[in-house]
Image (tube, rainbow, N blue to C red):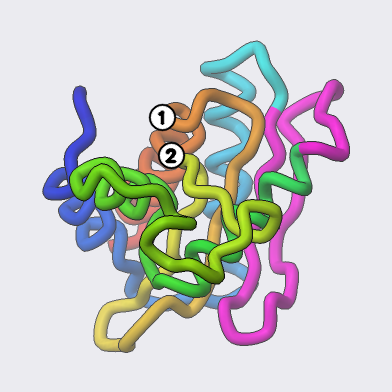
Amino acid sequence: MSLTVESVTTQEEACRLPSFDSNVAWEIGNIIRTNAQQNFTRPVVVYIAHANSSQLLFFATSGPGTLPDNMHWVKRKEAVVLRWGCSTMLMRLRLQARAKTLQELYEMSDPSIYAVHGGGFPVKVKGVEGAVGVIVVSGLTQEDDHAVIVDGIKEYLAKNP
């Protein structure tokens, strides 16, 4: 499936949670980790934190072989989600539609701080404005980093409507 601004916007809306706390983060994190282990040979980092405090709620690798560079990507993707309140994939597609880079559109957007590559996703709760958390996956292609998060949230929601 080819991702578009519209399809990713729809994904984000479909992935709104009924609530969010450390138990929810733990369940979603484990789903994402398990799915990454089952569907990919490359290891990933799975990172989930509160949006307002960056308090870490879940952190795991899917297996041996991740590198310190993965955490650099995690923090840069997290920065995009927290600043603009949308997934890194949505921001990437919006920029592509405008034929602009993040640095061209936002002159102060330092590429060492922000990464507009799929794999950063806002945690949103029904009835709550803005993101309450952030989920980041690093280690696969940007499309797969994004997809493993969306699939994990949807699996969680199927079990916890």
Above or below, 56 against 40 in this view is below
At label 1, the amino acid type is Glu
Residue 25 visible in the shown view: no
Q: Residue at x 52, y 24 (%)?
A: 141
Under tag 1, what secondary structure? Answer: helix
In percent of width and height, residue 64 lies at: 85, 23
At label 2, the amino acid type is His
Camera-nearest residue between 5 and 146? 5
In percent of width and height, residue 72 lies at: 76, 48
Camera-nearest residue between 131 and 17? 131
Residue 52 falls left or right of residue 123: right
Residue closest to the far left: 6
Separation (CA) of disc 2 from disc 1 = 5 Å
Above or below, 159 against 105 in this view is above
Quadrant in which residue 58 is drawn: bottom right
What residue is disc 2 on?
146
Quadrant housing the C terminus: bottom left
What span is in magenta?
44-69
Q: Which mark is residue 80?
A: none
Residue closest to the far top: 41
What residue is disc 1 on?
143
Above or below, 83 against 5 in this view is below
Q: Residue at x 52, y 72 (%)?
A: 82
